[in-house]
Image: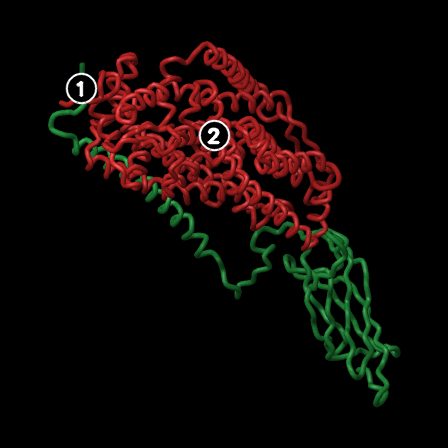
Amino acid sequence: MTATHRGEGVPDVVVLQMSYQQATVIGTRGQLVARAIVDDGSPVVGVTVEFLREVDFLGPRLISLGSAMTDAYGTARVPIDTDQATVRIRARFTGSDDYLPAEITSDINVPAAPDLGAGAADGKTGSEPSLAVVAAVMPSLLAAIALAIWLFLIGLSATTVLAIRRARPSVPVRKEGRS
Amino acid sequence: MPERDAPTSTTQELHAAALRPVLNAGRRFWLLFAALGLVAAAGAVAYAWQLIAGGLSVTGYNDQVFWGSYEATLVAFIGFSYGGALVSAILRLTNASWRGPITRIAEVSALATLLVGALFPIIHLGHPERVWELFVRPNFQSPIFWDMVAILTYMLATFILLALPLIPDAAALREHTGLGRLRRWLYRLLSFGWSGTPRQRQVLERALTIVAILIVPLAVIVHTVLSYTFSLTSRPGWHSTIFGPYFVIGAIYSGVAVVILAALAYRRAYQLHRWIDDRVIRNLAFVMVALGLAYGYATFSELTTEGFVGKQVEVELLYGLLLERFAPLFWAFVGMGLLAPVALIAIPRTRTPRGIALAAGLVVVAMYLKRVLIVVPPLSRPVIAGDIGSYLPSPVEIAIVSGAAAGGALIMLFLFRFLPVLAIDEMAEIEHERTEAAGVGAASPGSGNRDGGRWLIGRSFVRRCWRHPPWHGSSRRRP
């Protein structure tokens, strides 16, 4: 049931609820879920909810984690990194002509991501672009550059020494002043 | 006229000064050599004990803090080396007229500290006998492998940067009657038939310029790759984009401090005040202060970017560093490594050789401390679960690190028993360019006397230097 606006000039009171939803697909990120409802329990559809993280390093601040629009059930979701930590999250709806602003702050316990290997941890699927080509080419490229520098340095030293020897006067100068 | 006679005596004095550590090392030199040798030997014994008694179990490493003093020493010594090489290369490229007396010391300190630093990845290995497998079975995904490649490449470039300018110096000294046969043979070998012809000069100058250009990015690469060992690890406190430049600035900062200390030590020990004058030391000190300020900013930037994002684990790490467990060490670093050196050099009254030496010494100690703070605190916090780790270096570690530091100094002392401590040719060349730029010929009275009478070297000094070595009597002899 969708929230029905009561009438012109009377904005509805919105209640926000918030929770953390563990990822159901292994290796994907968990989500912050906020649900916006009006006082009769019906969902508020099509409004934007912003998610913010409260931090207090160098003074209290809010860091935006992103925003999402509520769906037919009144829920908005944003992904969150799965660091093992308890984080204080604020979900905020800034209000509209039809609805009053609302916000909720809650401590969310985010569990650690399971160690699933590189591919899974990145949350890659078959359709996503792969860095396999870069991974295959990069070491060879770096090795070639390193080898080129070595050859260049050794070559430069050798040619310099040879050129110095070649540019000696026919009568070695060092003998001239020998006592 | 005294000005006309001056070049001869100055040439003689320059050669004599450059060879003082070679010819007259002195009793104190041998005492220092013996003391450093004892410390280095104690380090070698400690390392042998580490190998026999079960590897790294004799260190203070544990399950949580599995890196410690060895990694800090590796980063610190490679950094010391970097400063020496860069001082030499950049001053050469910018044609700084005051570089002459310190380039040789900078290059030798770069090589000596690099040789010591490069030992530490091996010392850290539980099975050092398997180090060759890095070459035959390289793991291209590992930053350690690329560390090895970068360090070896940089070592080659540093060696060339030291060796090439030695060619004309060796030629100048190969017939020095005061030298023994071995050294004369060595100089003859290293001179490669140098006689100072314009073509030879051109070839050498070109090669030196190329190496100097190349060593700047190489040194940046080495220290950036060294930082990858940390920053490519998904660990709070290490995984930071600023780590590359942060390491580079820190390396030059501490490296310049080492060059200052080495220059002052040789100046004092061998009475080289006339050549390594206060102006040279002051200029190096200004470079050090500029780098210190840059490093202070980089430290501020590193801490605030981590803290500002506010990931809980990083904030906890920062609180540990700034206010809790590691705070005494961190603030000691700030005081000794950032504030005190800047103050000592900024205040004219303390900007004396003594004050600058104190500032440089503080920088070296504080920067080592900083490397410990980079390595240990992030490791002491478990990333999955478990207790907070603790770390205290064991006596074996302390002995090995002290032995290595003594070894670095020994290498330097040893090299200067064979190599002239001053870059004779370079100093002559600079003076030659200076007089040419001023449009004053050697024949003009008073030429070469533009430095308050310090370097009374005439226009044709370079040519005379090779054709008429001062120990052959009058430099006015002609073939």
- The answer to whether A87 is drawn above or below residue A171 in the figure is below
The answer to whether residue B223 is left or right of residue B306 is: left
Residue B402 appears in which quarter of the rendering? top right
Q: Disc 2 marks which residue?
A: B278
Give the letter of the chain under mark 2: B
The color chain A is rendered in: green
Q: How many marks?
A: 2
Q: Nearer the viewer, residue B371 or B138?
A: B371
The answer to whether residue B404 is left or right of residue B447 is: right
| Residue B423 makes an appearance in the image | yes
| Residue B70 makes an appearance in the image | no
Tell me, for residue A143, which label it has, or none: none
Name the image quarter holding the C terminus of chain B: top left
Tell me, for residue A177, which label it has, or none: 1
Residue B442 appears in which quarter of the rendering? top left
Q: Which residue type carries mark 2? A: Asp
Residue B308 pos. (x, y %): 68, 54
- Kind of element beneath mark 1: loop
The color chain B is rendered in: red
Name the image quarter holding the N terminus of chain B: top left
Residue B451 pos. (x, y %): 38, 32
- The answer to whether B345 is drawn above or below residue A13 in the figure is above
Q: Are marks 2 and 1 in contact (CB under 8 Å)?
A: no
Q: CA distance from mark 2 to mark 1?
A: 36 Å
